[in-house]
Image (spheres, rainbow, N blue to C red):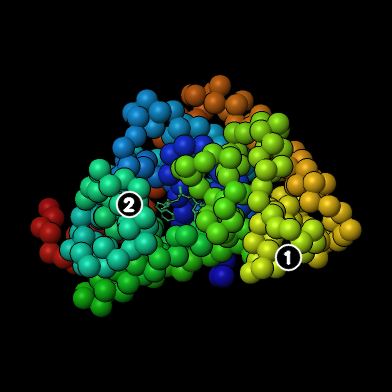
């Protein structure tokens, strides 16, 4: 990765974030902020593709802003903002829609999954979700997009759309690349390690939320699915449950996988699960505390988001105006 380039990512303010969101995305956002021009958004426009309670969406937006900062994102270094505060996202999305084929969108995995889950509300926004995401990324001339593995297909479509537009006119958009963390890009559900850990899982016991207290974290880890072998080693193919717990432990304690395995040599699954739970709960406690402190200072958070939106709009509008010129929109 080349330094000083633009980097973009976003998180939806839906439900409470899980440790999957943290390890796959937010923790990495913090690590990258010193070397890149980072834009981090709260994707509330994506959130409404599934019906949301308005009061809750508003509250979660501010909670996510506080969480970003509590996790270590410095709003002076990064541009931290709410997606709907920058109208250029919706505007570019409309243009990019005309460079995207319906068939491509129908084939997207997330669209198919969510259509199954929300069969009573397969709205146009759900189908258009990847195009709005392409607009997010392309507005900021983004070189790198740090995300979890589940977002790969969306970033690939953003690349295709960028190249299609650049070829139809002349180079306009930077073609973005995905960036993954070495460990933690796909944290799995504790009760079903064949699935990713999700904010909206049917059984909340399979997900550790960043808002969970210590007792809840430990209780959930105690119930985590393992296997009958009683050997603690990293082998995702044959031991998905144990390997998932080892990954979580190694990233939360900043230990290598070999060190993590060594910590549990000769130990049983009971001790192992308890140690993983404690490592996670101990890291979450100060984040929760800082988030609560920030949420008590709404004026500060509003100031951060206002300044973030202004800085984001400055960059976004430059790209949008280039696009409008190229496609022939009359400007005076
Ligand atoms: P969202 O809100 O679903 O998830 C936020 C980030 O968390 C990652 N993630 C995971 N990583 C590892 N293990 C898991 N179990 C896990 N679950 C989620 C996601 O990959 C993501 O990086 N569409 C995006 C939001 C978005 C966006 C963007 C991202 C909107 N515009 C532009 C990048 C660029 C989303 O739904 O994230």
> Which image quadrant for residue 286?
top right
Asked if residue 26 shows in the view, the reply is no
Extreme-bottom residue of the structure: 167
What's the mark number on residue 143? none
Percent across and percent down for residue 65 are 50, 36
* Left or right, 115 with reference to 176: left
Percent across and percent down for residue 45 are 33, 43
Q: Between residues 227 and 287, which one lies in front from this camera angle?
A: 227
Residue positioned 36% across, 42% down in the render:
47
* Left or right, 117 with reference to 320: right
Residue tagged 2:
116
Q: Between residues 51 and 137, which one lies in front from this camera angle?
A: 51
Extreme-right residue of the structure: 266
Query: Which of the marked residues, 1 or 2, is nearer the chain's N terminus?
Result: 2
What's the mark number on residue 234? 1
Residue positioned 66% across, 40% down in the render:
220
Percent across and percent down for residue 58 are 39, 29
Question: How busy is the neighbourhood of tag 2: few (under 14 within 10 Å), some, or many (20 plus)?
Answer: few
Q: How many marks?
A: 2
Instruction: Between label 1 and label 2, give the one nearer the viewer.
Output: 2
Asked if residue 159 shows in the view, the reply is yes
Question: How busy is the neighbourhood of tag 1: few (under 14 within 10 Å), some, or many (20 plus)?
Answer: many
Residue positioned 79% across, 51% down in the render:
269
* Left or right, 229 with reference to 225: right
Q: Between residues 285 and 10, which one lies in front from this camera angle?
A: 285
Q: Determine the CA span between mark 1 and mark 2.
A: 33 Å
Q: Is 327 drawn above or below residue 67 in the view shown? A: below
């Amino acid at each position: 990765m080349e330094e000083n380039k633009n980097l973009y990512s976003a998180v939806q303010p839906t439900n409470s974030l899980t440790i999957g969101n943290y390890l796959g995305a937010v923790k990495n956002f913090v690590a990258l902020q010193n070397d890149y021009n980072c834009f981090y958004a709260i994707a509330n426009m994506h959130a409404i593709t599934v019906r949301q309670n308005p009061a809750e969406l508003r509250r979660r937006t501010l909670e996510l802003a506080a969480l970003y900062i509590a996790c270590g994102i410095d709003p002076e270094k990064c541009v931290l903002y709410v997606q709907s505060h920058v109208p250029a996202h919706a505007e570019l999305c409309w243009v990019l829609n005309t460079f995207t084929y319906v068939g491509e969108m129908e084939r997207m995995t997330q669209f198919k999954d969510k259509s199954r889950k929300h069969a009573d509300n397969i709205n146009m926004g759900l189908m258009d979700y990847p195009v709005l995401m392409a607009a997010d990324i392309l507005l900021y001339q983004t070189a790198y997009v740090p995300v979890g593995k589940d977002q790969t297909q969306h970033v690939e479509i953003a690349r295709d759309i960028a190249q299609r537009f650049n070829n139809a006119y002349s180079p306009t958009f930077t073609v973005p690349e995905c960036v993954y963390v070495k460990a933690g890009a796909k944290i799995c559900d504790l009760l079903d390690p064949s699935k990713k850990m999700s904010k909206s899982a049917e059984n909340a016991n399979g997900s550790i939320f960043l808002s969970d207290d210590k007792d809840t974290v430990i209780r959930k880890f105690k119930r985590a699915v393992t296997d009958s072998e009683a050997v603690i080693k990293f082998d995702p193919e044959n031991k998905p449950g144990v390997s998932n717990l080892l990954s979580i432990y190694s990233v939360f304690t900043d230990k290598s996988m070999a060190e993590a395995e060594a910590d549990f040599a000769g130990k049983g699954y009971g001790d192992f699960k308890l140690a993983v739970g404690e490592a996670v709960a101990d890291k979450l406690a100060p984040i929760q505390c800082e988030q609560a402190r920030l949420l008590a200072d709404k004026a500060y958070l509003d100031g951060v988001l206002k300044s973030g939106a202004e800085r984001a709009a400055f960059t976004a509008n430059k790209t949008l105006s280039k696009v409008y010129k190229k496609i022939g929109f009359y400007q005076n």
